[in-house]
Image: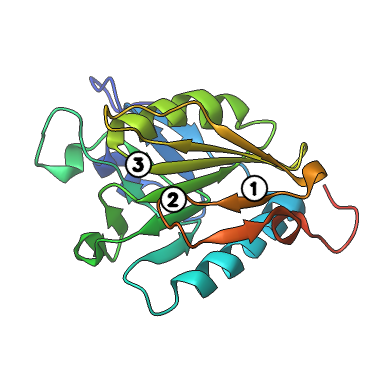
Amino acid sequence: MPLPKGQHEYSYKDYLSWPEDERWEIIDGIAYAQVTPSPLHQRISGNLYFELHGYLNGKQCQVFAAPFTVRLPMDNGETDESKNKNVVEPDLSIVCDKSKLDKNGYGGTPTLIIEIVSKSSVKCDQFIKLNKYEKAGVDEYWIISPENQSIAKYNLNEQGNYDKPNIYSMADDEVIISSIFTDLTIKLKNIFETWGDIA
């Protein structure tokens, strides 16, 4: 998508003008097209949403599945949100400050973000978004690999950096435990369970 004449980066103002049937993200002013998720991706996302929604029922926090727009805080302290250059659509987001919810999504930092990796999103999820979520102060970040049936869980330390990730594997019949929601435990077999061989 070409930039408007004389403009060097995309912003939330541009994002709002794009076709509703197209999915885009903006990270540091660069636009990234979102591909249509595979059936396996959708199955994993659905399984996780079921687990998280049930756990959060009656609690202050809520879980939202993509497409759900998150406008991350601006690095430079800019208050005009139309100039925001960080607009993402995580696969799953847990948000706890209801005052930051509006008709267009969430304007703030989610407490927990989950991304399900595809071949086209590996670099973005594991490097670009990892760095952006760390800088934005996302307390917990899960990167799910459908191919390996594993989860890398990153937690923000007191210095504002992600510690070395904890890795959980379906092969070891493990249970993932959130470091933020300490009574949230999910069996990996419940996440990766499918209706058969789908890709």
Q: Are marks 2 and 3 in contact (CB under 8 Å)?
A: no
Q: Nearer the viewer, residue 18 or 52?
A: 52
Q: Are marks 1 and 3 in contact (CB under 8 Å)?
A: no
- Indicate the position of residue 136 as horizontal and vertical percent values: 29, 36
How are the colours assigned in the image? rainbow
Q: Nearer the viewer, residue 142 or 3?
A: 142
Q: CA distance from mark 1 to mark 2?
A: 15 Å
Name the amino acid type tagged 2: Pro
The residue at the far bottom in this view is: 58
Whether residue 1 is visible, yes or no, is no
The residue at the far front in this view is: 183
Name the amino acid type tagged 3: Val
How many C-alpha atoms fall within 10 Å of the one at disc 3: few (<14), some, or many (≥20)? Answer: many
Name the amino acid type tagged 1: Thr
Whichever of labels 1 and 2 marks the residue nearer the N terminus, that label is: 2
Q: Which residue is mark 3?
A: 138
Helix, strand or loop at label 1? It is: loop
- Indicate the position of residue 101 as horizontal and vertical percent values: 26, 63
| Mark whose residue sits in front, 1 or 3 | 3
- Indicate the position of residue 86 as horizontal and vertical percent values: 31, 36
Which of the 4 image quarters holds residue 97?
Answer: bottom left
Q: Which residue is mark 2?
A: 19
